[in-house]
Image: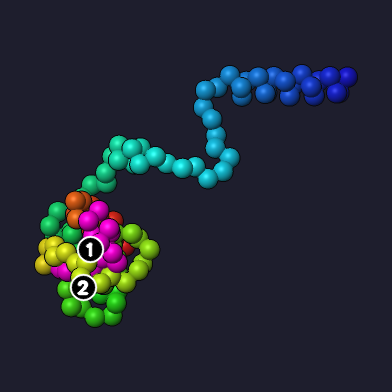
Amino acid sequence: MRRLMFLFCATLLLASLGCSRTQVASGPVAVKADAVAAAPAAAVPDEAGLVAILAKADATDGSVDTTVSKCAGCKLGMTGHPEHSVVAHGYTLQFCSDACKQSSSAKLDTVIAALK
């Protein structure tokens, strides 16, 4: 009797889970670039907010010289290079590669807003 009741409950549970149209991923999920592009962007701060973020990022290397030396493009914390730099809001942002510089330049204020 217990087995029959267990099988009945398990079947009912599986049937109810199988009827839903949502799927739960069980491992790493690859996100398509189109989905990321379609996601709403976080609000970009005003000029004063961006300058405050840049000032904090500038100070992380121990010197306040209006140069952000860590690459803001790839988020890997890599050291940027002067040959891959962009000036924004009075600060020089150094990127680790030309690819990071090019991809970040199109959305520079958004990249700055994402700095930690």
Quarter residue 114 falls in: bottom left
Question: Which amino acid lies under the numbered mark 2 shown in the image of this protein?
Answer: Pro
x then y, percent, for residue 88: 14, 62
Between 40 and 1, the one nearer to me in the picture: 40
Q: Position of residue 76 (x, y in %)?
A: 38, 63
In screen coordinates, is 48 left or right of 104?
Answer: left
Q: Secondary structure at mark 2?
A: strand
Residue under label 1, please give it.
53
Q: How is the image coloured?
A: rainbow
Residue extending furthest right?
1
Mark 1 is surrounded, within 10 Å at the Cα level, by few (under 14), some (14 to 19) or many (20 or more) other residues, namely some
Identify the image quadrant of residue 112: bottom left
* Identity of the residue drawn at 56% across and 43% down: 27
Name which residue type carries label 1: Ile
For label 2, the crowd category at 10 Å Cα-Cα, with few meaning under 14, some 14 to 19 and many 20 or more, is few
Q: Which residues are magenta?
A: 91-103
One can see residue 32 in this view: yes
* Residue depicted at 19% across the width and 67% down the height: 85
* Residue 69 rendering spot, x and y as whole percentages: 26, 72
The residue lying toward the viewer, choosing from 71 and 16, is 71
Q: Which label belongs to residue 82?
A: 2
The foreground one among 47 and 106 is 106
